[in-house]
Amino acid sequence: MHLAISSQTFDALAYVPGVSVPAAWVRSAHDAITHGVYSAVRHGGAATLNAARLAERLMVDANAPPSKAQRLGRSAINGVFGDALAQAGNALAVRMSLHRHGAELALTPESLANLRPRVAVFIHGLACDESSWSAQSGKPNSYYGSSLERDLGMSAVCLRYNSGLAVDDNAQALSDLLERLVQNAPARLRELTLIGHSMGGLVARRACVRADASNASWPRRIGSIICLGTPHQGSGWEKLGHFAAAALNVSKVTQPLARLANARSRGIQDLRRGLKIEAAAATPREDSREPPLRLLTGSLTDGESGVVGRLVGAVLGDGLVAQNSAADEGLMGDVQRVNLPGVGHMALLREPRVYEVLRGWLVGASQ
């Protein structure tokens, strides 16, 4: 930004007789100093992340599990910069793993021996981790997984992943992980249900496509994919962000702001396209079929606000995802849709009415 603004003045002075030569000397000195200062700032930023990684390693007991605050902070950083962290090999980059009862689940026959015939896999959204599904203070029964274990005899596991990576990259990693799960799980395992919130639903659906392309076996055990507030047709907010970045790129003065805006992670940028992701390598076979889909959408309005209220609800949806995108309107096949008025995007994670819908879908699937 500094250079973009100063260049306007120096470019104008270049046409002034008697001033152009001194101005060129000043510009050379100015640019050299500016490049030096901002290079130091950039290196300082990288050093800060490395220092944060070192400080975390020194201050945190390596044998103790990280606190919830530490996990949330790391997940938020990964949501915004996760692809850059992974590319740089930074230790702050989140590694994909499955978790059960608050601990990482090793994909060995011994660790998986207690899994029940029906398993629900919960997949969080952008900048979150598995704790986003956990019970809120004062609401000990709000975790859907515990309720499904109690009411339907299922086993519940949660996925943790770097939400800053491309959706297709996470989808491929999830496919590989589920293949290992199925190969090492007891023979009685007969059904997998993938439950994704927001971006998690995109990862779940794309994982099935990636698995189909590689002839993996786990999709044959999929009972259904349940998506809560997932932007299947893209996120309007990310589309707006993309448009704003393009507008900033028009002027030389604001181009640095455009580069800053475009520095957001690939995961965030993928939300603009939803499932319209260019991935020729993951094209499904002609004989493949989409697994049963259960799409749950929220709405900020209460459903009794008249025509204007319904219009606002259709446009704003749950506050982050519009209803037509979350409902993936136009999609045919084994699809069921439910809209819950008065439920915002993050409330979809721990809302009793959401659980009743989940339970109804899964009870029906078991019959």
Image (cartoon, rainbow, N blue to C red):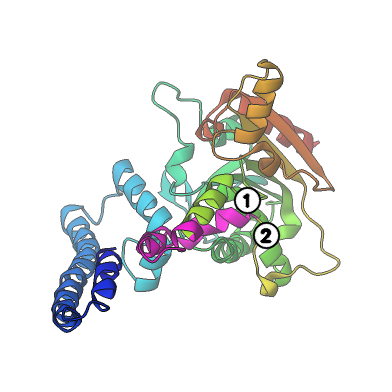
In depth, the one of 174 and 238 nearer the eye is 238
In the rendered image, residue 144, in percent from the top left (x then y), is placed at: 56, 33
Q: Residue furthest front?
A: 17
Q: Amino acid at mark 2?
A: Lys
In the rendered image, residue 240, in percent from the top left (x then y), is placed at: 54, 49
The quadrant the N terminus occupies is bottom left
Q: Amino acid at mark 1?
A: Gly
Count every numbered label the image shows and give the total. Answer: 2
Marks 2 & 1, CB-CB < 8 Å contact: yes
* Magenta span of residues: 246-274
Of labels 2 and 1, earlier in sequence is 1
Residue 317 seen: no
The secondary element bearing badge 2 is classed as: loop
Q: Residue at x 54, y 34 (%)?
A: 319
- As drawn, is 149 to the left or to the right of 357? left
Magenta span contains residue 287: no
Q: Quadrant of residue 314?
A: top right
Query: Which secondary structure class fits the magenta region best?
Result: helix
- As drawn, is 345 to the left or to the right of 283? left
Q: Residue at x 60, y 34 (%)?
A: 316
In the rendered image, residue 4, in percent from the top left (x then y), is placed at: 30, 67
Can you identify the residue that label 1 sits on? 234
Magenta span contains residue 268: yes
Whole-Å distance between the Cαs marked 2 and 1? Answer: 8 Å
In the rendered image, residue 5, in percent from the top left (x then y), is placed at: 28, 64
Q: Residue at x 22, y 65 (%)?
A: 50
Can you identify the residue that label 2 sits on? 276
Residue 229 seen: yes
